[in-house]
Image: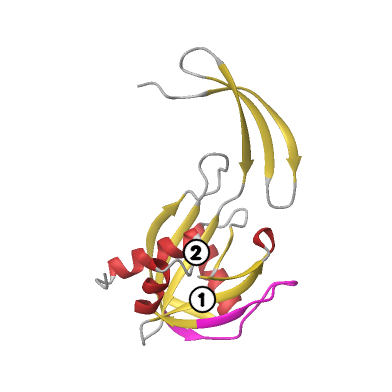
């Protein structure tokens, strides 16, 4: 199977602070052409951080595109020149004040492969200690602790709609033999 689509032309439609949007013309395997709208994103990280009492740290925050307050695992956009693990450690500290140990990768997630190039790197850690939360300017969120078992139930009951959060919770539970 060929399946590959060759880019013939790419036209920038928007270039913002977080995303860049292009309209591409591609050659299909049968020789015809098609258009592809692509959202380029620098990627992100998500950290499943577990306390000694087997609770996961969550952040509750307003998400503008959905006009909803969502409960998510700590996460953030990748910064240029920083590797995903270091970025994840920074986001965990900034959002929750937690410092983790024994970090382990849970893999990566493609949230919307039909039109977006974002890759989210997932990590697990055990919490070593807490320091002061270091929120960015204009960042408002509340930190919550939820037992891992309850978090898995919340995923299965459709109470946590965020894909990266669902995936990291279930992978954490599998990793720890809790499923």
Residue 156 percent location from the top left of the image: 38, 67
The residue under label 2 is: 46
- Asked if residue 177 lies in the magenta stretch, the reply is no
Residue 49 percent location from the top left of the image: 44, 75
Q: For the residue labelled by badge 1, is the local secondary structure a helix, a strand or a loop? A: strand
Q: Main secondary structure of the magenta part?
A: loop
Circle 1 or circle 2, nearest the eye? 1
Residue 61 to residue 76: above or below: below
Considering the image in quadrants, where does the C terminus appear? bottom left
- Along the line of sight, the residue nearer the viewer: 123 or 72: 72
Residue 43 percent location from the top left of the image: 56, 52
Q: CA distance from mark 1 to mark 2?
A: 11 Å
Which residue is rendered at x = 34% and y = 63% of the image?
A: 171
Residue 106 to residue 113: above or below: below
Q: For the residue labelled by badge 2, is the local secondary structure a helix, a strand or a loop? A: strand
- Asked if residue 131 lies in the magenta stretch, the reply is yes
- Along the line of sight, the residue nearer the viewer: 156 or 94: 156
The residue under label 1 is: 58
Which residue is rendered at x = 64% and y = 28% of the image?
A: 24
Which residue is rendered at x = 32% and y = 70% of the image?
A: 173
Q: Decide if residue 95 is on the left or right side of residue 173.
A: right
- Along the line of sight, the residue nearer the viewer: 136 or 73: 73
Which residue is rendered at x = 62% and y = 53% of the image?
A: 80
Quadrant position of residue 132: bottom right
Considering the image in quadrants, where does the N terminus appear? top left
Residue 14 percent location from the top left of the image: 75, 40
- Along the line of sight, the residue nearer the viewer: 155 or 104: 155
Q: How is the image coloured?
A: secondary structure
Disc 1 crowd rating (10 Å Cα; few below 14, some 14-19, many 20+) is: many
Count of numbered badges drawn on the protein:
2
Residue range of the region highlighted in magenta in the rendering = 127-144
């Amino acid at each position: 199977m060929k399946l590959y689509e060759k880019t013939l032309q790419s036209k920038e439609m928007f270039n913002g602070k977080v995303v860049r949007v292009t309209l591409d013309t591609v050659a299909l395997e049968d020789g015809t052409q098609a258009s592809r709208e692509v959202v380029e994103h620098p990627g992100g990280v998500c950290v499943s951080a577990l306390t000694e009492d087997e609770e996961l740290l969550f952040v509750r925050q307003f998400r503008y595109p959905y006009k909803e307050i969502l409960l998510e695992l700590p996460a953030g956009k990748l910064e240029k020149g920083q590797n995903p693990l270091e970025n994840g450690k920074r986001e965990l500290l900034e959002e929750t004040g937690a410092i983790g140990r024994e970090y382990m990768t849970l893999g990566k997630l493609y949230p919307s492969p039909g039109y977006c190039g974002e890759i989210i790197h997932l990590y697990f850690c055990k919490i070593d200690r807490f320091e002061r939360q270091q929120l960015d300017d204009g960042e408002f969120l509340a930190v919550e602790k939820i037992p891992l078992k309850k978090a898995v139930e919340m995923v299965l009951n459709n109470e946590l709609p965020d894909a990266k959060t669902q995936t990291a919770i279930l992978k954490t539970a599998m990793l720890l033999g809790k499923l």
